[in-house]
Amino acid sequence: MSEDNSFLVFSGTNTRYLAEKICASLQCPLGNLVVTRFSDGEFAVSYEESIRGRDVFLVQSTFPNSDNLMELLLMIDAAKRASARNIIAVIPYFGWARQDRKDKPRVSIGAKLVADLLAVAGINRVITMDLHADQIQGFFDVPVDHLYASGVILPYLQSLRLKDLVIASPDVGGSKRANTYAKYLGCPLVLCNKTRARANEVESMQIIGDVKDKNVVIIDDMVDTAGTIAKAADVMKEAGAKSVRACASHCVMSGPASERVQDSSLEEIVFTDSIPYANRCSKVKQLSVADMFAETIRRVVTNESISSQYLI
């Protein structure tokens, strides 16, 4: 792959840790891009090498704060104005994805707005992973390669060799994802039915299914404040579960999340490294998706099938 000079990989400031691992897997250097910051918070990006006629892959997750999204938009615009052949946004974590519909009157649909911003900036393709809702792919008018964290999480779960395994969904909305894991692993599925007092605050939770004397693995797409995951783990332990683990694609882990996980009944919580995690918590484990994204980039460059690398 290192001999192919038709493409270049660049990274935004806060996703450089992942871009470096992707480039190591591709055996190519990380492109030279400089972000200049002004004292008022404004910033500008510039490519320090020619990208004319190249396929440019821009690695940047759009997790909070909004600077990460703005940085990506400026990277796309600069690449377009520098005559890049194709501009591919590699967004391991697509922020604002929870705003995928009008769930009450007079609210924005943030996911569609971000998709439009990226399109206007000039992208030709998006590579992302585990969108909060699959239909967000339809918000884009360019091809979207939607990867799944199951490619790294499932092998890890299998390596644990857990007996009496049960897969759980922390809410009804995530039942499809959890059911896919349960089918692949050949084990039962249980659901948690929760009611919220308000955003990020769980009021009550009931388990639908049997977890007594079982090793439970809760599957979710992201963990933000960890209120739902911690509550689900505690409720399942009270219901007689032997052990409770959680696996989620995106490690948002904001506010009191680390403390909640540390104080909960969870044995461990497994994430990918789509988002950097700075607050160390002994129960948090991160699996790298760098090789998966590197392989996808390689297949995009060589026009090979991407779906063939999915486990489920």
Image (tube, rainbow, N blue to C red):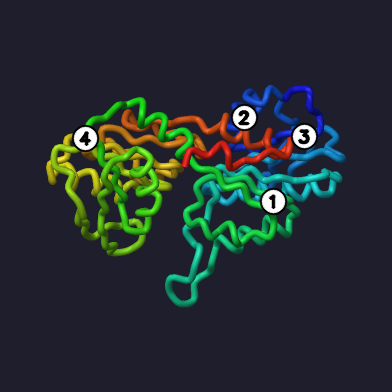
Side (left or right) of 224 relative to 113: left
> In this picture, is 145 found above or below 15?
below
Using a 10 Å C-alpha cutoff, classify the residue at mark 3 as few (fewer than 14 neighbours), some (14 to 19) or many (20 or more).
many
In the picture, which quadrant includes the N terminus?
Answer: top right
Using a 10 Å C-alpha cutoff, classify the residue at mark 4 as few (fewer than 14 neighbours), some (14 to 19) or many (20 or more).
some
Mark 4 and mark 1 residues within 8 Å of each other at the beta carbon: no
Q: CA separation, marks 3 and 4?
A: 47 Å
Question: Where residue 233 sits: x, y (%)?
Answer: 23, 43
- Tell which tag, 1 or 3, sits nearer the viewer: 3
**Can you identify the residue that label 2 sits on?**
22
Q: CA separation, marks 4 and 1?
A: 47 Å
**Can you identify the residue that label 4 sits on?**
164
Question: Where residue 310 sits: x, y (%)?
Answer: 52, 39
Which amino acid, mark 1?
Leu
Looking at marks 3 and 2 on the same chain, the residue that comes earlier in the sequence is marked by: 3
Side (left or right) of 21 relative to 183: right
**Can you identify the residue that label 1 sits on?**
73
Q: Which of 208 and 66 lies nearest the eye of the viewer? A: 208
Query: Quadrant of the rendered structure where residue 119 is?
Result: bottom right
Looking at marks 3 and 4 on the same chain, the residue that comes earlier in the sequence is marked by: 3
Disc 3 is placed on an element classified as: strand
Side (left or right) of 301 relative to 309: right
Query: Quadrant of the rendered structure where residue 16 is?
Result: top right
**Can you identify the residue that label 3 sits on?**
7
Q: CA separation, marks 2 and 4?
A: 36 Å
Q: CA separation, marks 3 and 2?
A: 13 Å
Which amino acid, mark 4?
Asp
